[in-house]
Amino acid sequence: MLYVTHDQTEAMGMADQIVLLRDGHVEQDAPPEEVYARPATSFAAGFIGTPPMNLFPLERRDAGMVLCGTDGPVLAPPLDDAAIGGIRPEHLRLADTGIAATVRHAEYLGADTVMACAAGTATLLARLPGRVVLPAGTRVSLATGEPIHLFDTASGRRVPQPHAALEGVTA
């Protein structure tokens, strides 16, 4: 049976296979868990998930790629081309070390809190368990135990990468 919807939550909950279209072209054709865990493009990454994946520009340093506008930590190995990084909000957590950020606001949703933080040139959303109360302007460090997703800036396609979380990002 074929079912067409514009509601990504409905698609994730009902489908055995998702064909994600943009401008009449297939962005990804895969089971829901693959579209979520390994989006083929930055468009797919930003479309699937609530809240959607954080997407941010990366810039190259000698040691590797860092979030644009920051001095680190290194989020990915050095790449020859410009890249977009991606981290799911639920994979970020507050830590002693990691990505330096400033809280913009937090939205308590009952089971969790979605916190918007300014980091370099990006705004990162962190989906944190329970109620987290931090006023705007609070300096925090965000870390992840998951590897970041990498996408080519020009094409938006996924960049192959090692599957280990990188030192300096985890805490």
Image (spheres, rainbow, N blue to C red):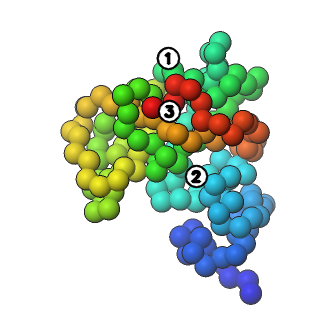
Q: Nearer the viewer, residue 83 or 38?
A: 38
x and y, in percent, of residue 114 in the image: 36, 51
x and y, in percent, of residue 119 in the image: 43, 30
| 1 up-or-down from 45: above or below | below
Is 61 placed left or right of 53 in the picture? Answer: right
Image point 25% across, 53% down: which residue?
131
Task: Quote the CA–CA distance across marks 1 and 3.
Answer: 16 Å
Quickly name the residue at label 3: 170
Which callout, 2 or 1, points at the residue further toward the start of the chain? Answer: 2
Task: Quote the CA–CA distance across marks 2 and 1.
Answer: 25 Å
Locate the C terminus by quadrant: top left
Q: Amino acid at mark 2?
A: Gly
Q: Nearer the viewer, residue 26 or 124?
A: 124
Q: Secondary structure at mark 3?
A: loop
Which callout, 1 or 3, points at the residue further toward the start of the chain? Answer: 1
Image point 65% across, 37% down: which residue?
164
Task: Quote the CA–CA distance across marks 2 and 3.
Answer: 23 Å
Q: Residues within 10 Å of mark 3 (few under 14, many from 20)?
A: many
To which quarter of the image does residue 26 belong?
bottom right
Image point 40% across, 50% down: which residue?
127
